[in-house]
Amino acid sequence: MSTLVIGLIISCASQKLPSGGPGDQLGPTLIGQFPQNGTVNYAGKEVQFFFNEFINRSTVTKALKIEPDLGIKTTIKQGRKSFSVIFEDKLPENTTVIIQLGSELTDTFNNKLGSPSTIAFSTGSQIDKGALSGAIYSAETGKGESGLKVLLFEETAEIGKNSAKYIAETDTAGVFQFDYLAEGFYTALWVEDANRNRNLEINREYYSTFSTEKIMVKTDSVAILQPLYITREDTIAPTLFETGLLTQQRLNLMFSEEIYFDEQTTIQVEDSSGNFIPAFPLYTVAEAKQKLLAHAQEPLSNEQMQYRVLINAVFDEASNRSNIIGSWFDGSTQKDTVQQRIIAYGIKNEYFFDEALTFRYAKPFSNTALADSFFVNAQTEMFKPWTKTKQAGNELIIYPDSLWSLEGLTFNLWDPSSLSFAAYNPTIWTDTKLGGINLKFDLNVVKDSSSTRTGLSDTLKSDVDTIKSISTYQIRVYDDNMKLYHSGTYVDSLLVNDEKSYLIERLPAKPLRLVVFKDVNGSGSYELGKINPFVSPEKYYFNAKVDVRSGFETTIEVDFSKDYEKLVMKLNALQNDVGPKSNSESKTEKSSSNEIERN
């Protein structure tokens, strides 16, 4: 053991917890390690860590990460303020070993490690100094997510059979980085590695390739991948778990997930003799959106009969559609005692000027009293009776009128449960309140500036050449609550020396999210990459905040290199914030330009 290690053990042994005063609120601090970071020609099989206080032994394994995957078993030897990682076999020659100690490590008071630490040492004469960075963002929100796993495979690895050589995780901004890489070609994948086997199970795990299949990493440089947008697409339609009767005519339908229905949805009840009874959906329950209440138009009270529901067109939040034949259930003699009331859940807070307003009640209407009592007022004026109404089942439908343009419009509905009027003030988007977005697909700008813009990849340049022939784009506009305002397709076959545009009209004047992706396979949905055969993820553009203004068209240039350039600038800024660079680090910015062009 080195003199440093002995000194640390002696100094740590005399420490005691102070008596009285506030409890310990500081995490442990790493005060020593062996071998030291940057050690070369290391021939040992043990790595030691020393801390300034007692550590929680149960957190050591979770906090420890060893890269690359050496295929060597390790044991942990724990002390009170230290622990050792012991390799059971000799470490391979000329290999850089990286040991990361994460913030999961705590002291005995559950205070986390002050700052994560990384030790790199080599069994050869030099430390590998290649690096690879990238970022992963949500396709829905455009934001990064921490803890996403990126697997890095060597060029010769057979993905699916050979484990990843390295694993990195994204930070809260979605950025990841591999350090101390040997020079060579690698393949990177985002994988939801649920079983932590450092591999991809293609038919069981969500995954995606990055834009480049083989990534070249060079010594003393940082290769930067184009950012990846991911989505965990829900392709499973809802199923019906349970069916029952609350009353003779009130059906209780429980689904496997949250659902919604629309004008396409139909329900029939079949009895065991083959007769069909019409029914219709009432509403989903606010506290349990997988629960749908429905109404049969005839009592289901025959004790000699069994019944089942036939549902056409019920949807989940991902718009997966189900047509369902339910299980048989018994009838009920329970009379309907449900009190009529307004179902506030599901009432929208905004409408377009030509859109009917729909209000739902707890059960079907027995007369026209609720429709007759409805009135509208705007400031000091009252408009009653309102003739443009319709009762259908349990829905009161209010049709548009020229009054929709009035400010401060209030819709008043009688609520029998409170014996009072309920007032609703939804936003009505009239013509004068609408704006638009004008998309500019000027990809010649990308091509012409490729020599001066930092970080334009060969992949992107070849994309520009492809786009000159025929390109199809899917365009989506929605708000922060995921309410969709526009879904369209733009096809362009002559993007050579011409600036093309796509105008989106009738948008509410508020900040909106814009998504544009290049629909390579014509599926109409955003496709992640595939590994075998290799397919790049489709090009994706995300604008988190397009400021739509009344009476104006907001012009947006669709630039698929935007996120890449931002990432390069961010990583360069982080390097500059670290402080004075070593000789190898000073090469990074210059070298990364060459690497960026390749990846």
Image (cartoon, grey):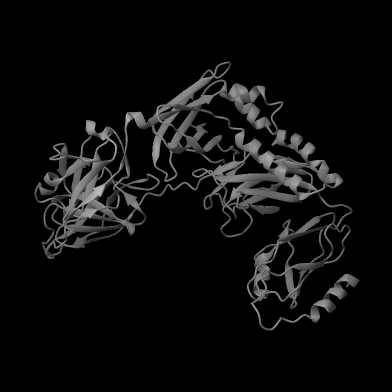
The residue most toward the front is 380
Q: Residue at x 19, y 56 (%)?
A: 341
Q: Nearer the viewer, residue 188 or 578?
A: 578
Q: Residue at x 74, y 47 (%)?
A: 577
Q: Is residue 321 left or right of residue 204?
A: left
Residue 87 seen in this snapshot: no
Image-based side of 95 in relation to 597, left or right: right
Answer left or right for 416 relative to 259. left
Residue at the extreme top of the image, as rendered: 497
Residue 244 position, x and y percent, is 23, 61
Asked if residue 348 shows in the view, the reply is yes
In this view, the residue in front, 158 or 261, is: 261
Q: Locate residue 356, reporting x and y percent.
A: 24, 37
Could you say where residue 568 lies in the image, as x and y percent from the top left? 68, 39
Quarter of the image containing the N terminus?
bottom right
Q: Residue at x 43, y 41 (%)?
A: 479
x 40%, y 49%: residue: 236
Q: Quadrant of residue 459?
A: top right
